Amino acid sequence: MTSSTSAASAASAAPAVTSVDEVLALVRARGGRATPSRRILLEVLFESSDHRSVEDLACEVQARAPEVHLSTIYRNVEELERLGVIAHTHLGHGPATYQLATIAHSHLVCERCGRRIEAPEELFADLARAAAERYGFSIDPRHFAILGRCADCAQEARDVAGGGG
Ligand SMILES: [Zn+2]
Ligand SMILES: [Zn+2]
Ligand SMILES: [Zn+2]
């Protein structure tokens, strides 16, 4: 068994995985169990990279496997997150949303219109450096979105303030 895939240069806690089987192998390698209900949950996560709440995921799992109990789905989400194969992010005031840990990323979210911009890690490089230097603090910009105004909403606000018609 050899691994010749090129290592991702970005410092990332999550190894690259490209299939449900690879994630399940990772689950086992980290001491977790690869159960059928976990496979279904991972299939749901792989099929769409949308941000989905645990309720959304539960709906989709039960749509294809009605016999899987809600409590099992919730436990699986918790356990897969603990094992580091899925991750949650807060995009605003709503419930946390889940994705595969490999595609976790940062966001800028407009508080006014809800527009969401997926922000690359390098956008936070200066902040990360400053926080580390001054406070010895490691930031995690993927966990919470940065809220504010998108370009259009900021422009509208300026127009209103300027009294322009
Ligand atoms: Zn959180
Ligand atoms: Zn906006
Ligand atoms: Zn996103």
Image (tube, rainbow, N blue to C red):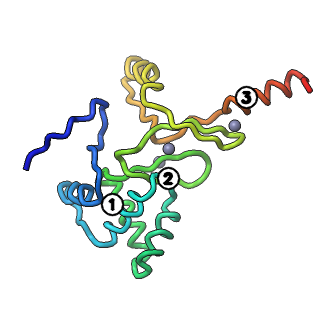
Q: Secondary structure at mark 1?
A: helix
Say what amino acid the circle numbered 3 marks. Answer: Ala
Residue found at x 29% / y 56%: 19
* Residue 96 sits above or below residue 118 on the image: below
- Ranked by sequence position, the earlier of labels 2 and 3 is 2
**Inter-mark Cα distance, 1 to 3:** 41 Å
Residue 115 in the image, given as x and y percentages of width and height: 64, 41
* Residue 148 sits above or below residue 134 on the image: below
**Inter-mark Cα distance, 2 to 3:** 26 Å
- Ranked by sequence position, the earlier of labels 1 and 2 is 2
* Residue 97 sits above or below residue 11 on the image: below
Identify the residue at the far bottom of this view: 67
Residue 73 in the image, given as x and y percentages of width and height: 41, 69
Is 28 on the left or on the right of 139, as rendered?
Answer: left
Disc 3 target residue: 154
Of residue 103 and residue 140, the one placed in the foreground of this image is: 103
Mark 1 vs 3: CB contact within 8 A: no
Identify the residue at the far left of this view: 1
Say what amino acid the circle numbered 2 marks. Answer: Asp
| Disc number for residue 79 | 1
Disc 3 beta carbon < 8 A from ligand 2?
yes
Mark 2 vs 3: CB contact within 8 A: no
Residue 27 in the image, given as x and y percentages of width and height: 24, 58
Is 105 on the left or on the right of 11, as rendered?
Answer: right
Of residue 4 and residue 22, the one placed in the foreground of this image is: 4
Residue found at x 41% / y 63%: 44
- Ranked by sequence position, the earlier of labels 1 and 3 is 1
Disc 2 target residue: 50
Residue 124 in the image, given as x and y percentages of width and height: 46, 26
Quadrant hosting residue 35:
bottom left
